[in-house]
Amino acid sequence: MQSWVKMEYVYAALILHKLGKEINEENVSKVISAAGVEPNQSKIKALIAALEEVNIDEALKTVTIVAPTVAESTKSVEKKEEAKKEEKEEAKQEEAVEGLASLFG
């Protein structure tokens, strides 16, 4: 698919697909117009051409398979960041204790 086709056009196609409507220039244009945006016919034509060879149901299955993996990776990164923060806090506390201990010699 052309990288310059804006996401709102892809979303319009997905809405039409979900509703069981034909994804064609007229219907995509109606969805874009209903969103309050002036439809760009060249972008719509590019989208329709790009989607001719795409099985949207299969593409969505691939996305739903990848999505949990991405979510798990994100959680893993968040846990690592949390652990680093805790380590820094513990290091600060240890430094404070060492500082106090040096006062009493």
Image: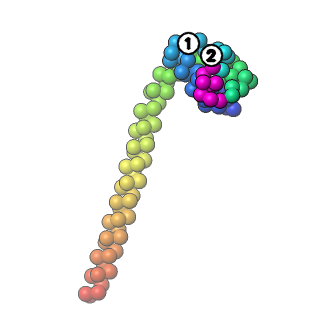
Q: Measured along the vertical axis of the image, is residue 65 above or below residue 73? A: above
The residue furthest right is: 42
Magenta-colored stretch includes residue 88: no
Question: Which amino acid, mark 1?
Answer: Lys
Residue at the location (35% across, 68% down)? 91
Determine which of the numbered discs, if any, sits on residue 21 in the image: 1
**From the image, which quarter does the N terminus lie in?**
top right
Residue at the location (29% across, 87% down)? 103
Q: How far apart are marks 1 and 2 (CA)?
A: 8 Å
Give SS at disc 1: loop
Q: Is residue 50 left or right of residue 92?
A: right
- Chief SS of the magenta region: helix
Q: Measured along the vertical axis of the image, is residue 79 above or below residue 56? A: below
Determine which of the numbered discs, if any, sits on residue 79 in the image: none
Q: Residues within 10 Å of mark 1 (few under 14, many from 20)?
A: few
For the residues bearing labels 1 and 2, Cβ distance under 8 angstroms = yes
Residue at the location (27% across, 82% down)? 101
Coordinates of residue 22 in the picture (x, y in percent): 59, 12
Camera-nearest residue between 36 and 73: 36
Give SS at disc 2: helix
**From the image, which quarter does the C terminus lie in?**
bottom left
Q: In this view, does 21 lie to the left or right of 92?
A: right
Tell me if residue 104 can be seen: yes
Residue span colored magenta: 30-37
Disc 2: which residue = 27
Coordinates of residue 59 in the picture (x, y in percent): 53, 21
Coordinates of residue 43 in the picture (x, y in percent): 70, 25
Camera-nearest residue between 55 and 73: 55
Camera-nearest residue between 8 and 47: 8
Which quadrant of the figure has residue 90? Answer: bottom left
